[in-house]
Amino acid sequence: LVSRKWKVNRTTIDLGDGVLIGNGHFAMMAGPCSIEGEENIQKTIDHLKANDVKIMRGGVYKPRSSPYSFRGMGIDGLKMWHEAAKAAGIKIVTEVMQVSQIAEMYDYVDIFQVGARNTQNFNLLDELGKVDKAVMIKRGISGTIDELLYSAEYVFSGGNENLLLCERGIRTYEKASRNTFDINAIPILKEKTHLPVIADPSHGIGIRDHVEPVALAATVAGADGVIFEIHDKPQEAFSDGQQTLDFEESARLINKMRALTEMS
Ligand code: PEP
Ligand code: MN
Protein backbone atom coordinates (compact mmCIF):
# COMPACT_ATOMS: atom_id res chain seq x y z
CA LEU A 1 0.00 0.00 0.00
CA VAL A 2 2.90 2.38 0.55
CA SER A 3 4.45 1.51 -2.81
CA ARG A 4 4.21 3.59 -5.94
CA LYS A 5 2.85 0.54 -7.70
CA TRP A 6 -0.26 0.94 -5.57
CA LYS A 7 -0.44 4.72 -5.73
CA VAL A 8 1.39 6.61 -8.45
CA ASN A 9 0.70 10.11 -7.17
CA ARG A 10 2.81 11.30 -4.28
CA THR A 11 1.18 11.76 -0.92
CA THR A 12 0.75 15.23 0.55
CA ILE A 13 0.47 15.52 4.33
CA ASP A 14 -1.85 18.34 5.40
CA LEU A 15 -1.28 19.50 8.98
CA GLY A 16 -3.84 22.29 8.65
CA ASP A 17 -3.38 26.07 8.52
CA GLY A 18 -1.66 25.72 5.16
CA VAL A 19 1.19 23.53 6.43
CA LEU A 20 1.77 20.87 3.77
CA ILE A 21 4.50 18.24 3.43
CA GLY A 22 5.47 16.24 0.36
CA ASN A 23 4.56 16.33 -3.30
CA GLY A 24 6.59 19.48 -3.87
CA HIS A 25 6.09 20.96 -0.38
CA PHE A 26 9.44 20.96 1.41
CA ALA A 27 9.19 20.85 5.21
CA MET A 28 11.63 22.07 7.81
CA MET A 29 11.25 20.82 11.36
CA ALA A 30 13.61 22.12 14.02
CA GLY A 31 13.85 22.24 17.78
CA PRO A 32 15.75 20.88 20.74
CA CYS A 33 16.45 17.19 21.18
CA SER A 34 14.46 17.37 24.44
CA ILE A 35 11.90 19.96 25.46
CA GLU A 36 13.55 21.58 28.49
CA GLY A 37 11.07 24.12 29.86
CA GLU A 38 9.22 27.35 29.22
CA GLU A 39 12.22 29.50 28.32
CA ASN A 40 13.67 26.86 26.00
CA ILE A 41 10.29 26.49 24.28
CA GLN A 42 9.75 30.22 23.81
CA LYS A 43 13.26 30.94 22.53
CA THR A 44 12.93 28.15 19.99
CA ILE A 45 9.51 29.33 18.85
CA ASP A 46 10.79 32.89 18.44
CA HIS A 47 13.67 31.62 16.30
CA LEU A 48 11.35 29.48 14.16
CA LYS A 49 8.93 32.37 13.68
CA ALA A 50 11.74 34.72 12.71
CA ASN A 51 12.82 32.21 10.06
CA ASP A 52 9.34 31.23 8.90
CA VAL A 53 9.67 27.58 9.98
CA LYS A 54 6.28 26.07 10.77
CA ILE A 55 7.06 22.79 12.54
CA MET A 56 8.90 22.35 15.85
CA ARG A 57 10.49 19.10 16.98
CA GLY A 58 11.31 18.08 20.54
CA GLY A 59 11.09 15.04 22.78
CA VAL A 60 9.08 14.87 25.97
CA TYR A 61 9.45 11.08 26.22
CA LYS A 62 13.09 10.35 25.45
CA PRO A 63 14.52 6.93 24.66
CA ARG A 64 17.90 7.21 26.35
CA SER A 65 20.62 4.57 26.26
CA SER A 66 21.25 5.12 29.96
CA PRO A 67 18.33 5.27 32.41
CA TYR A 68 20.27 7.92 34.35
CA SER A 69 20.20 10.42 31.45
CA PHE A 70 17.43 13.05 31.17
CA ARG A 71 14.32 11.20 30.03
CA GLY A 72 12.10 14.14 29.16
CA MET A 73 9.44 16.36 30.75
CA GLY A 74 6.58 14.03 29.93
CA ILE A 75 2.98 15.06 29.37
CA ASP A 76 3.19 18.28 31.41
CA GLY A 77 6.04 19.47 29.21
CA LEU A 78 4.01 18.61 26.13
CA LYS A 79 0.99 20.59 27.37
CA MET A 80 3.15 23.63 28.11
CA TRP A 81 4.78 23.34 24.69
CA HIS A 82 1.45 22.93 22.90
CA GLU A 83 0.03 26.07 24.49
CA ALA A 84 2.97 28.18 23.33
CA ALA A 85 3.18 26.55 19.89
CA LYS A 86 -0.53 26.93 19.22
CA ALA A 87 -0.41 30.62 20.09
CA ALA A 88 2.46 31.02 17.62
CA GLY A 89 0.87 28.92 14.85
CA ILE A 90 3.63 26.31 15.06
CA LYS A 91 2.98 22.57 14.56
CA ILE A 92 4.44 19.89 16.87
CA VAL A 93 6.31 16.69 16.02
CA THR A 94 7.25 14.58 19.04
CA GLU A 95 8.06 10.98 19.83
CA VAL A 96 5.50 8.54 21.20
CA MET A 97 7.20 5.58 22.87
CA GLN A 98 4.34 3.33 23.82
CA VAL A 99 0.71 2.58 23.09
CA SER A 100 -0.60 4.05 26.36
CA GLN A 101 0.87 7.46 25.48
CA ILE A 102 -1.11 7.86 22.24
CA ALA A 103 -4.41 8.89 23.84
CA GLU A 104 -2.69 11.06 26.44
CA MET A 105 -0.65 12.93 23.81
CA TYR A 106 -3.29 13.05 21.07
CA ASP A 107 -4.68 16.54 21.66
CA TYR A 108 -1.25 18.14 21.77
CA VAL A 109 0.52 16.57 18.80
CA ASP A 110 0.47 17.24 15.05
CA ILE A 111 2.87 14.46 14.02
CA PHE A 112 3.50 11.38 16.16
CA GLN A 113 7.16 10.38 15.74
CA VAL A 114 8.09 6.72 16.00
CA GLY A 115 11.74 6.64 17.05
CA ALA A 116 14.48 4.46 15.65
CA ARG A 117 14.27 2.17 18.67
CA ASN A 118 10.57 1.60 18.07
CA THR A 119 10.47 1.18 14.29
CA GLN A 120 9.54 -2.45 14.77
CA ASN A 121 7.28 -2.03 17.77
CA PHE A 122 4.42 -3.56 15.84
CA ASN A 123 1.82 -3.03 18.57
CA LEU A 124 2.60 0.67 18.59
CA LEU A 125 2.39 0.78 14.77
CA ASP A 126 -0.96 -1.06 14.81
CA GLU A 127 -2.40 1.49 17.25
CA LEU A 128 -1.05 4.45 15.26
CA GLY A 129 -2.84 2.99 12.25
CA LYS A 130 -6.12 3.83 14.00
CA VAL A 131 -5.24 7.45 14.68
CA ASP A 132 -6.31 10.38 12.47
CA LYS A 133 -3.06 12.30 12.92
CA ALA A 134 0.16 12.19 10.94
CA VAL A 135 2.84 9.67 11.88
CA MET A 136 6.54 9.86 11.03
CA ILE A 137 8.41 6.58 11.26
CA LYS A 138 12.18 6.69 11.64
CA ARG A 139 14.37 4.02 10.16
CA GLY A 140 15.54 1.48 12.72
CA ILE A 141 19.03 1.74 14.18
CA SER A 142 20.10 -1.28 12.16
CA GLY A 143 17.04 -1.36 9.96
CA THR A 144 16.94 -2.00 6.25
CA ILE A 145 14.92 0.13 3.84
CA ASP A 146 12.51 -2.75 3.31
CA GLU A 147 11.97 -3.11 7.05
CA LEU A 148 11.11 0.59 7.24
CA LEU A 149 8.62 0.13 4.41
CA TYR A 150 7.02 -2.84 6.16
CA SER A 151 6.70 -0.76 9.33
CA ALA A 152 4.94 1.91 7.28
CA GLU A 153 2.71 -0.83 5.88
CA TYR A 154 1.49 -1.63 9.41
CA VAL A 155 0.25 1.94 9.95
CA PHE A 156 -1.10 2.41 6.43
CA SER A 157 -2.97 -0.89 6.35
CA GLY A 158 -4.48 -0.01 9.74
CA GLY A 159 -6.18 2.93 8.06
CA ASN A 160 -3.83 5.85 8.66
CA GLU A 161 -2.45 7.14 5.35
CA ASN A 162 -0.94 10.30 6.87
CA LEU A 163 2.52 8.84 6.98
CA LEU A 164 6.06 10.14 6.62
CA LEU A 165 9.32 8.20 6.56
CA CYS A 166 12.59 9.41 8.05
CA GLU A 167 16.17 8.42 7.28
CA ARG A 168 18.18 9.10 10.45
CA GLY A 169 21.37 7.13 9.85
CA ILE A 170 22.15 3.50 10.54
CA ARG A 171 24.69 1.71 12.68
CA THR A 172 27.72 0.58 10.70
CA TYR A 173 31.35 -0.28 11.49
CA GLU A 174 32.27 3.40 11.04
CA LYS A 175 33.05 5.09 14.34
CA ALA A 176 34.02 8.56 13.06
CA SER A 177 30.37 9.60 13.17
CA ARG A 178 27.52 8.70 15.52
CA ASN A 179 25.61 6.94 12.74
CA THR A 180 26.10 6.57 9.01
CA PHE A 181 23.56 8.76 7.23
CA ASP A 182 22.40 6.68 4.29
CA ILE A 183 22.01 9.18 1.47
CA ASN A 184 21.13 6.26 -0.81
CA ALA A 185 17.94 5.75 1.13
CA ILE A 186 16.52 9.05 -0.09
CA PRO A 187 16.29 8.31 -3.83
CA ILE A 188 15.54 4.64 -3.18
CA LEU A 189 12.62 5.44 -0.87
CA LYS A 190 11.38 8.09 -3.27
CA GLU A 191 11.37 5.51 -6.04
CA LYS A 192 9.68 2.83 -3.97
CA THR A 193 7.07 4.79 -2.07
CA HIS A 194 4.63 7.64 -2.58
CA LEU A 195 5.14 8.78 1.04
CA PRO A 196 7.15 11.91 1.90
CA VAL A 197 10.76 11.20 2.90
CA ILE A 198 12.34 13.30 5.64
CA ALA A 199 16.07 13.45 6.47
CA ASP A 200 17.47 13.75 9.99
CA PRO A 201 21.10 14.88 9.58
CA SER A 202 21.49 15.58 13.32
CA HIS A 203 21.22 11.94 14.38
CA GLY A 204 22.51 10.91 10.96
CA ILE A 205 26.03 12.19 11.58
CA GLY A 206 25.92 13.38 15.19
CA ILE A 207 28.53 16.13 14.76
CA ARG A 208 27.37 19.77 14.85
CA ASP A 209 29.85 21.10 12.30
CA HIS A 210 28.79 18.50 9.74
CA VAL A 211 25.02 18.67 10.09
CA GLU A 212 24.72 21.38 7.43
CA PRO A 213 26.44 19.56 4.55
CA VAL A 214 24.46 16.37 5.24
CA ALA A 215 21.20 18.34 5.38
CA LEU A 216 22.00 20.04 2.08
CA ALA A 217 23.03 16.76 0.45
CA ALA A 218 19.75 15.16 1.51
CA THR A 219 17.84 18.14 0.15
CA VAL A 220 19.57 17.84 -3.21
CA ALA A 221 18.99 14.07 -3.16
CA GLY A 222 15.25 14.72 -3.14
CA ALA A 223 14.18 14.67 0.51
CA ASP A 224 10.76 16.21 1.17
CA GLY A 225 12.01 17.80 4.34
CA VAL A 226 14.71 17.96 6.97
CA ILE A 227 14.35 17.59 10.74
CA PHE A 228 17.24 18.94 12.81
CA GLU A 229 18.18 19.80 16.36
CA ILE A 230 18.69 23.39 17.48
CA HIS A 231 19.21 25.16 20.83
CA ASP A 232 20.08 28.71 21.85
CA LYS A 233 23.02 27.27 23.82
CA PRO A 234 23.82 23.82 22.41
CA GLN A 235 26.61 23.24 24.93
CA GLU A 236 23.99 23.46 27.71
CA ALA A 237 21.36 21.27 26.02
CA PHE A 238 19.92 18.47 28.20
CA SER A 239 20.62 15.94 25.42
CA ASP A 240 22.46 15.68 22.09
CA GLY A 241 24.21 19.06 22.41
CA GLN A 242 27.15 17.74 20.36
CA GLN A 243 24.97 17.55 17.25
CA THR A 244 22.75 20.56 17.95
CA LEU A 245 23.01 23.77 15.90
CA ASP A 246 22.90 27.17 17.55
CA PHE A 247 20.42 29.70 16.19
CA GLU A 248 22.95 31.35 13.90
CA GLU A 249 23.89 28.02 12.32
CA SER A 250 20.23 27.10 12.13
CA ALA A 251 19.29 30.32 10.30
CA ARG A 252 22.13 29.78 7.85
CA LEU A 253 21.01 26.22 7.12
CA ILE A 254 17.37 27.26 6.73
CA ASN A 255 18.34 29.90 4.17
CA LYS A 256 20.52 27.46 2.22
CA MET A 257 17.82 24.80 2.12
CA ARG A 258 15.28 27.40 1.06
CA ALA A 259 17.54 28.55 -1.77
CA LEU A 260 17.92 24.94 -2.96
CA THR A 261 14.25 24.04 -2.81
CA GLU A 262 13.00 27.26 -4.34
CA MET A 263 15.39 26.74 -7.25
CA SER A 264 13.90 23.43 -8.25
C1 PEP B 1 15.07 12.05 18.31
O1 PEP B 1 14.64 12.45 17.21
O2 PEP B 1 15.17 12.79 19.29
C2 PEP B 1 15.51 10.66 18.42
C3 PEP B 1 15.60 10.07 19.61
O3 PEP B 1 15.82 10.11 17.25
P1 PEP B 1 16.09 8.58 16.86
O4 PEP B 1 14.88 7.83 17.25
O5 PEP B 1 16.30 8.67 15.39
O6 PEP B 1 17.33 8.15 17.59
MN1 MN C 1 18.32 13.79 19.77
Image (cartoon, grey):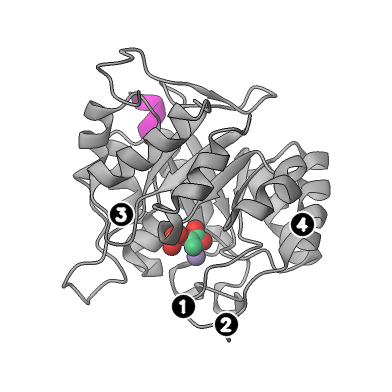
Check the image and report above or below for 170 versus 10. Answer: below
* Residue 261 within the segment the image draws in magenta: yes
For the view shown, which residue lies furthest in the bottom direction? 68
Tag 2: residue type? Answer: Ser
Residues at marks 3 and 4 touching, judged by CB atoms closer than 8 Å = no
Residues at marks 4 and 1 touching, judged by CB atoms closer than 8 Å = no
Q: Position of residue 120 (x, y in %)?
A: 39, 52
**Label 2, on which residue?**
69
* Residue 255 within the segment the image draws in magenta: no
**Label 4, on which residue?**
42
Check the image and report above or below for 98 versus 136. Answer: below
Tag 1: residue type? Answer: Ser
Measuring 24% from the left and 44% from the top, which residue is drawn there? 145
Q: Kindly report the distance in space between the C-alpha atoms of the residues bearing marks 2 and 1.
A: 8 Å
As drawn, the label of residue 213 is: 3
Check the image and report above or below for 114 versus 179. Answer: above
Mark 3 or mark 1, which is nearer the start of the sequence?
1
Q: Which residues are magenta?
A: 260-264
Q: How many C-alpha atoms fall within 10 Å of the one at disc 3: few (<14), some, or many (≥20)? A: few
As drawn, the label of residue 103 is: none
The secondary element bearing badge 4 is classed as helix
Majority secondary structure of the magenta segment?
Answer: helix
**Label 1, on which residue?**
65
Closer to the camera: disc 4 or disc 1?
A: 1
Q: Position of residue 150 (x, y in %)?
A: 32, 39
Is 115 in front, or is 123?
123
Q: Kindly report the distance in space between the C-alpha atoms of the residues bearing marks 4 and 1.
A: 28 Å
Residues at marks 2 and 4 touching, judged by CB atoms closer than 8 Å = no
Mark 4 or mark 3, which is nearer the start of the sequence?
4
